[in-house]
Image (cartoon, rainbow, N blue to C red):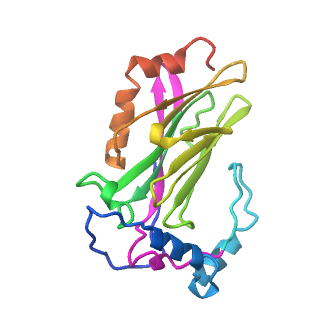
């Protein structure tokens, strides 16, 4: 299951030199100024966001309606969409909910995306669960937000037993990327894949893994291959797991 949020309005494609870094200190300074300059704000988008203020969900962080500069102020055509990819995998009869946060190729990140690929996966989490609902997906939910463009953030949860694994992860234009999972902090430069195994005693185990640069084209096959490896099998099936 792939869900995406595309650019808010049509924009021209910008040709850039992929050998150069798009995001500079001067651009960051200008963007910070725009955040507090009403003449730069996308008022139509703000009006839409206000409509969702107070939206109730079980996501870990409530959504706020902040004034946001027009996306094209970062650069014409600099936003091409974000999304999340969710799937249910199985490992020796146990269910694992997998979620990945994705940014489409744009001038902001194209220098970091493999040739021939249209997006990058900057975070993947795989959570062992005994509540997998593959019809209505009531055991999990994900949400990605582009309002910090050219920085992006996503969040979600997976239910198990009577508890929940909550997570959030972000990627900045400057290539900083972190995740928080039930208040454990992960620097994603040490690995963009996080495995989480709840135990019957209500404790959690985590395993951070380094992965190659992935796109959504690669993701399904990569996870299938990983789940055949003994390291992953042992992690999810060791004594004490749910």
Q: Residue at x 46, y 42 (%)?
A: 189
Residue reaching furthest to the front? 25
Residue 176 appears left or right of 62:
left
Residue reaching furthest to the top? 239
Q: Is residue 233 above or below residue 196?
A: above
Residue interval drawn in magenta: 67-96
Residue reaching furthest to the bottom? 39
Towards the viewer: 54 or 137: 54
Residue 22 is situated, as x and y percent measured from the top left of the image, at: 37, 67
Residue 25 is situated, as x and y percent measured from the top left of the image, at: 46, 68
Q: Evaluate whether residue 192 shows in this view.
A: no
Q: Residue at x 48, y 66 (%)?
A: 150
Residue 125 is situated, as x and y percent measured from the top left of the image, at: 52, 38
Towards the viewer: 220 or 24: 24
The quarter of the picture where the C terminus appears is: top right
Q: Is residue 28 magenta?
A: no
Q: Is residue 21 above or below residue 68?
A: above
Residue 199 appears left or right of 194:
right
Q: Is residue 230 above or below residue 38?
A: above
Residue 8 is situated, as x and y percent measured from the top left of the image, at: 48, 74
Towards the viewer: 32 or 94: 32
Q: Is residue 215 above or below residue 202?
A: below
Q: Which quarter of the figure has residue 33?
A: bottom right
Q: Is residue 82 magenta?
A: yes
Exactly how many numbered labels are in the figure? 0
Q: Evaluate whether residue 37 shows in this view.
A: yes
């Amino acid at each position: 299951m792939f869900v995406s949020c595309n650019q808010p309005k049509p924009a021209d494609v910008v040709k850039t030199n992929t050998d150069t870094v798009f995001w500079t200190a001067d651009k960051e300074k200008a963007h910070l100024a725009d955040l507090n300059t009403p003449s730069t704000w996308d008022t139509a988008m703000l009006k839409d966001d206000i409509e969702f203020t107070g939206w109730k969900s079980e996501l870990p962080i409530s959504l706020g309606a902040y004034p946001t500069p027009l996306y094209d102020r970062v650069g014409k055509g600099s936003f091409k969409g974000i999304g999340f990819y969710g799937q249910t995998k199985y490992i020796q009869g146990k269910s694992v909910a997998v979620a990945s946060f994705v940014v489409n190729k744009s001038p902001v990140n194209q220098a970091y995306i493999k040739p021939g690929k249209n997006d990058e996966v900057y975070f993947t989490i795989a959570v062992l669960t005994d509540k997998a609902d593959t019809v209505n997906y009531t055991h999990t939910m994900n949400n990605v937000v582009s309002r910090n463009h050219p920085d992006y953030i996503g969040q979600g949860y997976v239910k198990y037993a009577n508890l929940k694994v909550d997570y959030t992860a972000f990627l900045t234009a400057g290539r900083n990327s972190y995740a928080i999972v039930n208040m454990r902090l992960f620097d994603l430069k040490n690995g963009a894949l996080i495995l989480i195994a709840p135990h019957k005693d209500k404790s959690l185990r985590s395993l951070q893994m380094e992965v190659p640069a992935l796109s959504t084209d690669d993701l399904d096959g990569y996870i299938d291959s990983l789940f055949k490896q003994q390291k992953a099998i042992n992690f999810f099936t060791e004594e004490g797991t749910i």
